[in-house]
Image: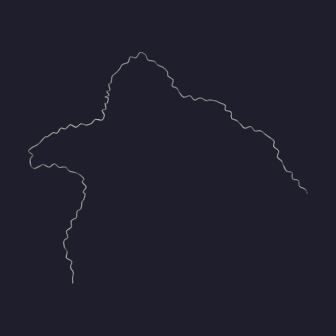
Amino acid sequence: EKRVEVPFAVEKLVEKRVEVPVERIVEKRIEVPFPVEKIVEKIVEKRVEVPVEKIVHVPVEKVVEKRVEVPVERIVEKQVQIPMPVETIVEKRIEVPVETIVEKRVEVPVERIVEKR
């Protein structure tokens, strides 16, 4: 007995998602092959109320350049001394207590050793 393998077709459905990175997007205008017959222009106006929390008034500053002439009656020259720090030398005697040295005679007892022969 001889066995023979017969190939047969197997149908399999495989779903695979692949993300392709897009480097640039090209926008192209395409013309419609049929003409547009009616153009509708409609402008819609709607008022919306926005609540205002606080109104701040900013003062407007104006710079006005104006030349003012002041009459000079007399010119006063005065020498002004600028206070400078002064180093002062203070001589002062300071008494330091010193221990007094007192000489005192002290007798030291001595043993007498007498040798007998």
Give the image location of residue 21, x and y in percent: 25, 55
Q: Up-down: is 4 above or below 16?
A: below
Q: State how many labels appear.
A: 0
For the view shown, which residue lies furthest in the bottom direction? 1
Q: Which of the pair 59/100 is nearer the observer? A: 59
Q: Is residue 59 above or below residue 6?
A: above
Question: Relative to residue 35, is residue 82 drawn left or right?
Answer: right
- 5 in relation to 65, above or below: below
State which quarter of the image contains the C terminus.
bottom right
Locate the N terminus by quadrant. Answer: bottom left
Q: Residue furthest top?
A: 73
Q: Name which quarter of the figure residue 102 lies in.
A: top right
Q: Is residue 114 left or right of residue 100?
A: right
Q: How is the image coloured?
A: one colour
Q: Residue 90 appears at what percent x and percent y?
A: 62, 29
- x and y, in percent, of residue 40 in the image: 12, 42
Indicate the quadrant where residue 107 lies: top right
Nearest to the observer: residue 33 or residue 74: 33
